[in-house]
């Protein structure tokens, strides 16, 4: 029961309270770039969930069993980026083979998951994250945190895409169409998610 309670706290924290896009402001490039259409936003979100989860697992093992024991902590960023790049290449090949239309709609933003600072951010945070009692994250905690962080990223991406699709048909002044209204909506969403920061867990 205690495990489920801890996972619930982690899920709410990663998805709402410390959302990578709206609270930590990481991954804004795909957030604004891919959120024009709902289907491409959802596809990108699924790819990010997979990459964040797998990257969290592999980078945790690299950190604990390779970098720390051999005193190679200074190579952490390089090792993590190489791991993420490999995973993104794999995801890109799978999407290109199974869903060419999604691959085309994601365009340049799919390979940009490699440099998406949210993916690198969750990998690095997992190596230093601790529970309230000071216990560091174990392997399962790191993997689940990566998964929940990806879900949080996908949630705000899909919400943003839904709002931007509706705003295409709104009667807006010409100067507000496109990116200006998208930035205003992004700011309003960040303020709305700020309300979750008062949760006591």
Image (tube, rainbow, N blue to C red):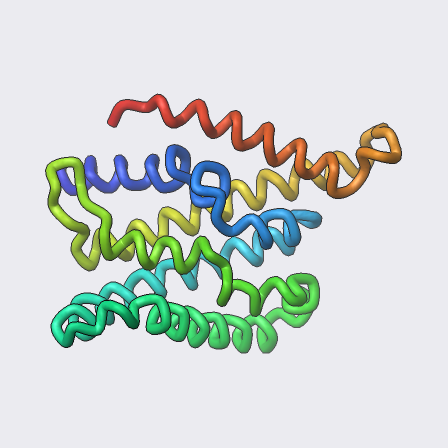
Residue positioned 69% across, 62% down in the render: 105
Number of numbered markers: 0
The answer, for residue 104, to whether it is visible in the render is: yes
Above-or-below relation of 117 to 182: below
Residue at horizontal 24 percent and vertical 71 percent from the top: 62
User: Residue 53: x, y in percent?
Assistant: 36, 59
Q: Residue furthest right?
A: 174
Q: Is residue 157 left or right of residue 86?
A: right
Whether residue 120 is situated above or below residue 70 in the rendered picture: above
Q: Residue at x 38, y 38 (%)?
A: 18
Image coordinates of residue 41 in percent, x first then y, are 61, 52
- Residue 39 visible in this rendered orientation of the protein: no
Q: Is residue 9 left or right of residue 25?
A: left
Percent from the top left, x then y, of residue 136?
Answer: 15, 49
Location of residue 133 in the rendering, given as x and y in whole percent from the top left corner: 11, 37
6 up-or-down from 64: above or below: above
Q: Quadrant of the C terminus?
A: top left
Quarter of the image where one finds residue 60: bottom left
């Amino acid at each position: 029961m205690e495990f489920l309670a801890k996972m619930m706290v982690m899920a709410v924290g990663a998805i709402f309270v410390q959302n990578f896009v709206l609270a930590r402001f990481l991954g804004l490039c795909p957030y604004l770039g891919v959120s024009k259409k709902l289907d491409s936003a959802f596809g990108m979100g699924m790819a990010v969930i997979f990459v964040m989860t797998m990257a969290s697992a592999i980078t945790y093992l690299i950190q604990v069993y390779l970098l720390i024991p051999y005193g190679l902590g200074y190579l952490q960023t390089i090792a993590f980026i190489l791991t993420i790049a490999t995973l993104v290449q794999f995801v890109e090949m799978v999407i290109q083979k199974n869903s060419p239309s999604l691959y085309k709609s994601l365009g340049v933003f799919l390979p940009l998951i490699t440099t998406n600072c949210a993916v690198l951010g969750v990998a690095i945070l997992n190596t230093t994250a601790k529970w309230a009692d000071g216990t560091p994250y174990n392997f399962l905690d790191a993997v689940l945190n990566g998964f929940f962080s990806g879900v949080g990223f996908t949630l705000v991406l899909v919400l943003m895409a839904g709002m931007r699709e509706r705003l295409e048909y709104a009667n807006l002044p010409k100067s507000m169409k496109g990116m200006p209204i998208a930035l205003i909506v992004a700011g309003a969403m960040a303020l709305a998610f700020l309300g979750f920061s008062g949760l006591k867990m």
